[in-house]
Every structure is written in C-alpha cells, then in structure tokens.
Image (cartoon, rainbow, N blue to C red):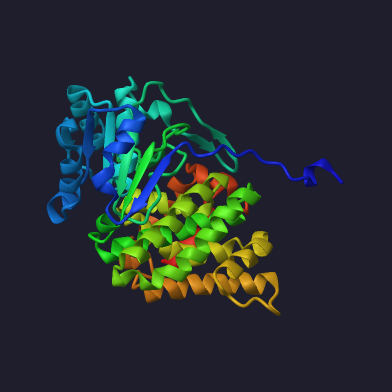
Amino acid sequence: MALDKVLQFSYNSVAQEIVCGPDSISGMNASLDRLGVSRPMVVCGPNILRESNVVQRVQEALGDRCVGLFSAIEPHSPMEVVYEAGALAKELRPDALVSVGGGSTHDTCKGIAILLAGGRDLHDFEIRFKPPDHVFIPDLPSGRPPIISVPTTMGGAELTRGGGGLTDKALGRKVLMSGKGAGHKAVIVDGKALATTPMPILVSTAIGQLRIAIESVYSRTHHPIADAFGLHAIEGLVRHLPGCPERDLDGLLNIKTAALLAALAGAAGLGLNTAMAHQTGALYRVNHGEANAILLPHTMRYNLDASADRQALIAKAMGIDTGGLSDEEAGLAAADAVDRLCRQLNIPATLREVGVPAEGLELIAAATLHDRALATNPKPIADAGPIMSVLRSAW
C-alpha cells in the first residue's frame, strides 16, 4: 500500500478542566485553587451584567478574591475593546481572568491575556493565511494568565485550541489570533447560567457548534479521534436541540456537552462555512451562530462532490435512514435536515433577513480569502468565485 494511503495524524490532548452541573459556579474556587491563582478579574458584557444574575453569582462565589470587573465587552471582539480591557487589567494586575458570557467575551479574554504577558500589537500574533492552504501561526508570549470561563451560550470558544477572532474595523475583517496554549484552563458549565440566556442565542450558538462538528468530519484533515468527537456531537445536538426551548436544565447541559465535543472535534480542521461566518459577523454584526446556521446547508451542498462519503457519515449520525441511498443522496438529505432543524428553531433562513446587503457579499468574499479556515475545506478555494456563489445562494 502506498504510504500516502496509510493512516497518519497527530493529536494533542486538551489541557483543560471541565466542571459541569446545575450550579457549578458555587464551587468554582476549587478550580482557581487547582490552578494556583487567587486574584481573578471578571470580564463580561453589559447585557449579561444588567439582565441576568450570572455575573453576580460569580462575584459572590469568588468573594474577596475578585480584584475587579470589566463589563464593556462588545459582539465580535473589536480590537479597541480588547486594548481598553487590557489597560484596566494592567492596572489591577490579576493573576487570572474569569470570562463570563459567550464567544466574544472568551475571545476578548484571550487577547487580554496576550497584552498582560507583554504583547503590544495584537497583529503580531495574527495567523497569516495565503490561499489555498498556506498557514503561518506565530508563537504567543509566555507568562499569560490562565482563563477560567463561565459560558452562557452553546458556543465552544472556551474550548477551542486557537486564539479566537478579534475584529479589526480599520481592516474591515476579523483577525484570527494564534492560539497554541491559549485555551481556557477551566470551563465552569452551569445549567442555571445557561437557562438565563435568550433562546435565539442558545439555539443559534448550538447550530454554530453543529457546523464545527460537520466541518470537522469532512475536513481535508479529518481523522478518527476527531470523528469520534464530531459524530457524537452531531448525534447529541440533533437529539436534544428540539427540546431546548423548554429550558430543562438536564437538556441544556446535554446540549452544551455535545457543543463542547464539537469544539474538541474542530482541532481536525474546519472549512468554508466557518470562514464566511467569521467575516459576515465582523462586517455586518451578524450573530455568529445565526451566520453559521444560515450558511451551513449551502456549504454542505457546495462541498458534497468532494466529501460525499463523509457527509453520508454525518447523515447517519443525524439519525437519517440512509439505506438504499447513495453517498450523494445521503449528503443532500443531511443538508436538508439541517435546514429543517434551523426552521424548527426559528433561526433566520437568509443573509438578507439578518441585515446583510446584496452589495456586501463581495466584501464578505474578499475578507473570507484571508481566513485560515479555508485551508482545510474539502474543495480548495483560491479565489472569490466559489465564495460568491455560496453567498448568493444564502442571500
């Protein structure tokens, strides 16, 4: 057998603690003790501070350990907000960051940690991508404080191995940060905290994680360990998501657990959907989960001719009876099922519904060409043509 046909991959185990339960926040000091930290700064957005009790529960649990609060996080992690938060952190000198919220808060905290470790210009740590598949990942400064996250959405930014995405408004795109070792060291999954989040955010961020699981399974660099995470995540999300509106704590924790498995699967590589959703959100402030959900059936169909056998696996994980179907037919059935699930959860169906103008599609396509997620898409993409085709179908 030719060597290029022999199984080969590398896998680095995630160095994180996950604590999951209905009231995990109350015991979070145990995680700080295990990390050897005692002066955390809490980071959150204004809405969660004002409209729920989650931040207050975190502050109560931390007690006198908490050295301060930054509560001005904005969607899509604008760089100017990261620098503002970093300036406060340098004054307070925390030895840890507690990130309360969703992906924008978690990614912002990764940027704050870089600044606390001596980084000055965050662009120095940007991942450089040259289509179709050349990626350069710079090293991060040592001495970054650990991040403890209290997620309130079904997204998985707290578990991703990368450094997250920050929006550079001057460049007009999202900048993906280097992230080896940048993941959060402890993840406190609290069912009561999840239950405070508006339902459109919960369901859209969960579909965003379904996108990660699906892209990991048909990524050009897929492998069996990521398949185990990804296919199990797909099965769990499809099974539990329809019951999400009931806000049952067990159901919410099962959805979140499946979403975290998807985040672990994403280490195998992502694709076109992720790349476009990054830039759609950065340019037009579209909720990342909604952007992913709108685009996902279209990117699955676009990639079908290069990944039909993998998409057949996805269909089976979704519970679709694939008996008698070709791989192509099973893949189309999976894309249709994703579309139906999104409609069942009342997620917008088109980009124009979430405020993306027709003239903005070219801007999204141009920005997408800088996104490293394209590097592992099943079909290599070297120019804006294929991106525009998918964007038009989703508009």
Nearer to the camera, 337 or 143: 143
For the point 38% across and 43% down, the residue is 174
Q: Position of residue 137 (x, y in %)?
A: 51, 31
Q: Is residue 163 above or below residue 188?
A: above
User: Splitting the image into 4 quarters, where does residue 66 fall?
Assistant: top left
Q: Which residue of the protein is positioned furthest toward the bottom in this rendering? A: 324
For the point 16% across and 36% down, the residue is 63
Look at the image and tell me whether residue 186 can be seen.
Answer: yes
Q: Is residue 31 above or below residue 57?
A: above
Look at the image and tell me whether residue 146 can be seen.
Answer: no
Q: Is residue 69 left or right of residue 147?
A: left
Nearer to the camera, 35 or 245: 35
User: Splitting the image into 4 quarters, where does residue 184 fall?
Assistant: top left
User: Splitting the image into 4 quarters, where does residue 111 fall?
Assistant: top left
Q: Which residue of the protein is positioned furthest toward the left in this rendering? A: 50
Q: Position of residue 248 (x, y in %)?
A: 31, 68
Nearer to the camera, 343 or 38: 38
Q: Is residue 382 above or below residue 306?
A: above
For the point 35% across and 64% down, the residue is 250
